[in-house]
Amino acid sequence: MRSSIAKVTTAAFLAGLALIGGAGTAAAHMDADADHPHGAFAVGGDAAAVGGSAGAVGGDAAAVGGNAGAVGGDAAAVGGWAAAVGGDAAAVGGNALAVGGDAGSVGGSALAVGGDAGSAA
């Protein structure tokens, strides 16, 4: 019984160390007059937000006045939102969603699934 508890405790400790070691960097800047909080969250990647929100898991996300989320890819948003799952997404004043491909938008919307998409208003 003691050896089982010791094994479980050791496994939990090592898993915690691995999680801390896999954590990425996150930085957030909140506007003083914002109605809701903004933030950044990163695990195994990097996330940065200024007046918006960014989250990254195994990728990179950056947001300026918008929202960006990346899982295994890269997402960047300026005044819009961008989301990437296994691909890259970039939006300036619009929306971009990439799933296994690349999507870019300037003032419009772009959706890429397994390919590339671009939009300009």
Image (cartoon, rainbow, N blue to C red):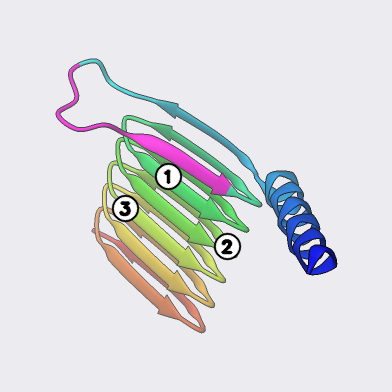
Height in image: 96 above or below 66?
below
Could you say which disc has been placed on residue 81 in the image?
3
> Looking at the image, which residue is at 71% across and 50% down?
22
Pick the residue in front: 118 or 60. Answer: 60
**Furthest-top residue in view?**
32
Q: Mark 3 falls on what kind of element?
A: strand
Q: Which residue is mark 1?
A: 54
Q: Residue at x 37, y 53 (%)?
A: 91
- Residue 38 on image: x %, y %: 32, 34
Which quadrant does the N terminus fall into? Answer: bottom right
Q: Is residue 84 left or right of residue 14?
A: left
Three-letter code for the amino acid on which mark 1 is drawn: Ala
Q: Which residue is mark 2?
A: 73
Residue mark closest to the camera, 3 vs 1: 1
Residue 84 at what x, y percent from top left?
47, 64
What residue appears at the point 55 percent right and 46 percent down from the top-left corner?
A: 42
- Please tell me whether mark 2 sits on a helix, a strand or a loop: loop
SS at circle 1: strand
Tag 1: Cα neighbours inside 10 Å, few (<14), some, or many (≥20)? Answer: many
Rounded to the nearest whole Å, what is the CA distance between mark 3 and mark 1?
Answer: 10 Å
Would you say the magenta stretch is mainly helix, strand or loop?
Answer: loop
Where does the magenta region start and end? 33-42
C-alpha distance separating marks 2 and 1:
13 Å
* Cβ–Cβ under 8 Å for marks 2 and 1: no
Q: Earlier in the sequence, mark 2 or mark 3?
A: 2
Residue 77 vertical position relative to residue 48 in the rendered view, above or below: below
Numbered label attached to residue 1: none
Q: Amino acid at mark 3?
A: Trp
Q: Quadrant of residue 119?
A: bottom left
Residue 40 shown in magenta: yes
